[in-house]
Image (spheres, coloured by chain):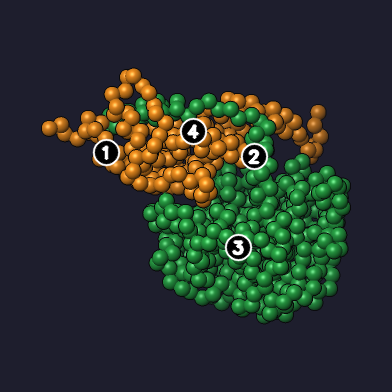
Amino acid sequence: MTNDLDEALSRTLREHAGDAGTPQLDLDAVRGRARRIRRTRTTVVGAGAAAVVLAVVTPLGLLGGGSTDRSVDPATSGTSSTAPDGPGVRGESVVIDLDELAAGDAAGVPYELDGVLHLPDGATYTVPGAVPGPPAIGDVVPYGAGEWLATVAPDGAGVYELQHLSADGELVETVAGSGDGLHVAGPMAYDPATARVAWVEQSLTSSGTEAVGGPMEVVVVDADGDEVSRAELTSGETSTPIAPPLGFRDGGVLVSIGNPDLSRTLLVGSDGSRSELALDWTDAASPDGELAVRTTYAPDGNCATVRRVDDDEALGWSTSGCRSYGVFDPQSRYVLAGPSESQVAHGGQVESILDAATGASVVDLAWPEASQTQIWAGVWESPRTLLVSVRQSATGEPAARYALVRIDVTTGQADLAAPIEAYDATYDNGGERFFLR
Amino acid sequence: MSTPGATVTTPRRRTRDDEFADYMAVRQASLLRTAYLLCGDQHIAEDLVQTTLAKLYLAWDKVETQASLDGYARRILVNENNSLWRRAWKRRESSTDEVPDTVQHSDTYDDGSAGRLWEFVQTLPRKQRAVIVLRYYEGLSESEIAAALGISTGTVKSQASRALAALRDRTPSDLSGEEQR
């Protein structure tokens, strides 16, 4: 009888669970591991200085107002005529099989591969001093007429400077950096409606061997590079908080400040005013300013919740089970979901594309059963196509291949947005190799 | 008396480390047993538990109630185990028909079938094995397993069905339900 096997399994597992041994962990050991994890996250997502305690990369898809398709020159960008009317396929599984995917168009957004920034028109920028493994680029946004602003941490230490790159991928100037006693947060915000760019910079002072953050300011410049506003965010923090700009809203910049003692979400006006929108950290906000992702863990199994951005922060929706949400598409119709501990809003792994209005699944990502596959949350290339970074190997094989894969939400089709990269131990950090920016 | 609108500091925030230490003392043995069943290696299991607790520690202030801690910890544990292959120096597990070396389990009442069944469990693909452990050791429902693994209940059912079919093929007929000749 099947019940015999059920009972045998229960009995066998109970018996062998006793072979696990006696746990010997103490709090210090766990806290030490936690510190290492935090440092790794900081390095991998490239957000902030050594004392930074939370790490966030804000996808450009979060930026405020209209289309944020970065493949389009900001000077000529507008609403995509190919945009779907609403969420397309429903509950479809898209199988990511690197042996089966056809080559598609080249990636329409910037990405970093092995320390080289690849821009959409084919230009490249080799980051001086980049080390194999961690990304050297924090974020890249359009700037002026076909040029770019990039946050760059050449040594992989997570201390960023802001660089102005030409359309050809040449370094024009360092806008803010350690030479000025400044570092900038990895993520930036870009408003396609006005071509303005916002970043957060912080003055550095030295304390022993570590750089300690001073006052933080959010800076907004226009397409000509003229400073539109500069407003102080914080001062006197005992540790360096992370303050990624989430996007533009109501003429101001939405900023989420992460700090172990005090997290909050602010709207910083162009006049320097600061409105506190929430006494909490916001993982992501939709470009239309309607929805925000806040992560909590409730006894009913709900984890992250998607809330309305209004006075009472009404619950937009949540789903059963623990998942993390983030990375809204440019038109606020889709949002990505991933494992709860993976922080999909911060570049973590992605499992599904959901209807941003309801949380219903639109596309579930899948892969061949005989493979080991990881898919990292990427960047919306257009209102209907998402780019993701994939690492895939045959089951049991350590040598993985890496790819940039495009997923069309409306058709449920996938193709390659860059040639597949073969395994190379030099660059294998156990994670992704294509870093979408 | 609190003032409306004032920030309220919860007791847990004041005693974060104490509370976490209490939770750790109570739950780490259970986590270690589950980890061992998932990976089949004592040292890897200890490492999994340490990473799980470290990630739980980092998220401690985000977890609203004690009741949701176990589920969240379990989710981290399972995902950490699933991610092990990424770290080549820790990787030992793969889907294979080969029976791996294991800790020698001694049970004087075992006629040998339990030992063989355990060996076969260890040859299951990782997700199927996780489903089996969560169902038959943790006693979770299909929906709870789905939440822990981040998959649909339909996938839980299909993974369990495949795992049981594979085990039936390999285990003695008196356990698998086959007709005795």
The answer for how far apart the CA atoms under marks 2 and 4 are is: 18 Å
- Is disc 2 in the same subunit as disc 3? yes
- Is disc 2 in the same subunit as disc 4? no
In front: B166, or B7? B166
Can residue A194 be spotted in the picture?
no
Amino acid type at circle 2 is Arg
| Residue B42 marker | 4
Q: Nearer the viewer, mark 2 or mark 4?
A: 4
Q: Reading the chain from its start, which is encountered first: label 2 or label 3?
A: 2
| Helix, strand or loop for disc 1 | helix
| Residue A210 marker | none
Above or below A70: residue B93: above
Q: For the view shown, which residue lies furthest in the left direction?
A: B181
Amino acid type at circle 1 is Arg
Residue carrying label 2: A33
Residue carrying label 3: A435
Amino acid type at circle 3 is Phe
The answer for how far apart the CA atoms under marks 2 and 3 are is: 25 Å
**Residue placed at 56% from the left, 77% from the top?**
A81
Residue carrying label 1: B170
